[in-house]
Amino acid sequence: SPTVASSIGGPPFDGIDAMSVGTNSCALRNGEVWCWGDNSYGTTGTGGASIVPARVVDEAGVPLADALWVKARAAHACASLRDGRVLC
């Protein structure tokens, strides 16, 4: 049966609205974008490779809070924001 994913040493990582999984993975949770994985190309936007989900920030260092969708692939990850921007 399905189990709730959790951050290692942290609270359960639940309430996921959408997820894109691959070498790098990202999840959409209440408009926030969380990513983890290989990060060989800086694709997760989290500063380094990690198996622990980390909240993604924009180019100004502000956490993304109004995402509509997220897609992660081997060499990139992108999020579409409510204000019309697409960040990759």
Image: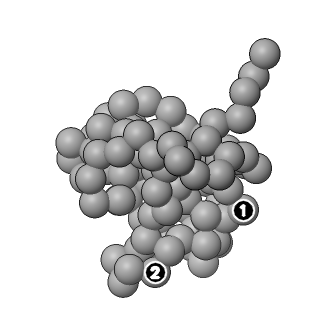
Question: Left or right of 33: which side holds 61?
Answer: left
* Rendering coords of residue 67 (x, y %): 61, 64
Question: Which one is nearer the viewer's eye here, 33 or 68?
Answer: 33
Alpha-carbon distance for marks 1 and 2?
A: 16 Å
* x 72%, y 27%: residue: 3
Question: Which one is nearer the viewer's eye here, 17 or 36?
Answer: 36
* Rendering coords of residue 66 (x, y %): 64, 71
Question: Left or right of 22: which side holds 40?
Answer: left
- Which quadrant would the C terminus be assigned to in this image? bottom left
Question: Left or right of 23: which side holds 27?
Answer: right
Q: Is residue 81 visible?
A: yes
* x 52%, y 55%: residue: 34
| Label 2 sits on residue | 62
Asked whether the beta carbons under mark 1 and mark 2 sit within 8 Å of each other, the answer is no
Q: Quadrant of residue 87?
A: bottom left
Q: Quadrant of residue 37?
A: top left
* x 65%, y 52%: residue: 11
Question: Which one is nearer the viewer's eye here, 61 or 66?
Answer: 61
As drawn, the label of residue 65 is none
* Rendering coords of residue 48 (x, y %): 27, 53
| Label 1 sits on residue | 30
Q: Amino acid at mark 1?
A: Asn
- Asked which colour scheme the image uses, the reply is one colour
Local packing at callout 1 (Cα closer than 10 Å; few below 14, some 14-19, many 20+) is: some
Q: Amino acid at mark 2?
A: Val
* x 46%, y 40%: residue: 25
Q: Earlier in the sequence, mark 1 or mark 2?
A: 1
Question: Which one is nearer the viewer's eye here, 11 or 3?
Answer: 11
What secondary structure is marked by label 1?
A: loop
Q: Is residue 76 visible?
A: no
